[in-house]
Amino acid sequence: MGVSIGSIVPKKEIELIELSGKKIAVDSYNNLYQYLTIIRDRVTGEPLKDSKGMVTSHLSGLLYRTANLIEFGIRPIFVFDGEPPKFKKKTIEARQAAKEEAREKWKEALEKGEEAIKYAQAATYLTDEMIEDSKKLLDAMGLPWIVAKSEGEAQCAFMCKKGSVDATASQDYDSLLFSSPHLVRNLSITGKRKLPRKEIYIEVKPEIIELQEVLSSLGITHEQLILIGILIGTDYNQGIEKVGPKTALKLIKENKTLNKLLSKVQWKDEVDPEEVYEFFLHPPVIEKYKIEFKEPDKERIIEFMVDEHDFSKERIEKIVEKLQTSFGKEKQVSLKGWLGK
């Protein structure tokens, strides 16, 4: 879910081509959840499955949409979550309970012949097998992936600060709290999207968010941005009741440190706010890693997607051809520097 600071964060819409030639660290779990949520039957809510009953929505999205990014000259590096911090346990358990409840409502809606998609999306699970299959596909596509020491977004942010990549890609804003200099949203869901339960389509474009611009426009420090997140609620704590982004910003400007802040609000969460604060400031990361792009392996991709998971051979061959043609080429465009380049 991430921290909900979108309403106070300045962002800029761009065209996908403006990211050509850029290396982007992708928050893999966030990315795969998008595919599992979106690529479903619009009536029953059922995800794509192969003849063995295995879910393949994530593989479909990962192959087709990543191939589209590569065609635009974008170089994605996928970062998977490692071991979550111990104080995230309660959040994980709450999410699992919510998914089970959604699964029951999904079943009931199907039995009653009612619209089931919203419950199906809320019941989405990302299993260990899905994660391993995703890594296999990325290997076949010649794309690098890394398993973070802890949270994927923290690793992405570290890689961006280090200069190994140009930006972090995620729908969540947490990477800003982890101090990623640049965040790209909507990277893998660009194009026309249908609004839920409406016959209305909107054009979704990538958004660039720059940390320094966020801090400057809000008149705060990075440490205070973390405090805003903690007040609203993060993946690790519930936040303060009835405190949204604007109220949190006001409180932070009046009480600039964690200690002063805690004297003004009623903290009810079991999680120590100091521990959450320190985790965002100094998250565990892998400091040495290898980023290597390789030529896509046509035979491996076809064997995995067609032979093992029943995708159309004709469609897969076209995608592989696109990958082979696009890989290693960078489209020549003027970025006029959202990254100052």
Image (tube, helix red, strand yellow):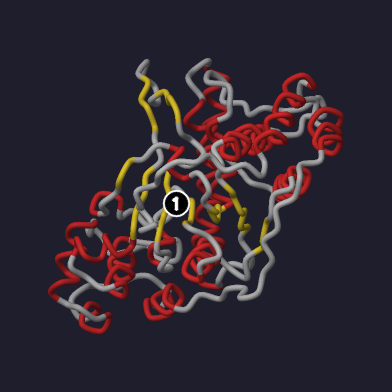
Q: Is residue 85 left or right of residue 174?
A: right
The answer to which of 164 and 28 lies nearer the viewer is 164
Q: Is residue 338 left or right of residue 84?
A: left
Residue 75, percent from left and from top = 59, 49
Residue 220, percent from left and from top = 22, 70
Q: Give the quadrant of residue 92.
A: bottom right
Q: Is residue 10 left or right of residue 255?
A: right
Report the residue at 65% width, 36% height from top. Answer: 326
The answer to which of 333 and 28 lies nearer the viewer is 333
Q: Give the quadrant of residue 195.
A: top left
Please say whether residue 50 is visible from this viewpoint: yes
Give the mark count: 1
Residue 236, percent from left and from top = 45, 66
**Rendered view: 51 above or below 167:** above
**Rendered view: 56 above or below 228:** above
The answer to which of 81 and 206 lies nearer the viewer is 206
Which quadrant would the C terminus be assigned to in this image?
bottom left
Element assignment for label 1: loop
Q: Amino acid at mark 1?
A: Met
**Rendered view: 122 above or below 224:** above
Report the residue at 58% width, 34% height from top. Answer: 68
Residue 329, percent from left and from top = 62, 42
Q: Which residue is mark 1?
A: 1
Please say whether residue 100 is visible from this viewpoint: no
Residue projecting furthest to the bottom: 259
Mark 1 Cα shell of 10 Å, populated few (<14), some (14-19), many (≥20): few
**Rendered view: 323 above or below 156:** above
Report the residue at 72% width, 21% height from top. Answer: 315
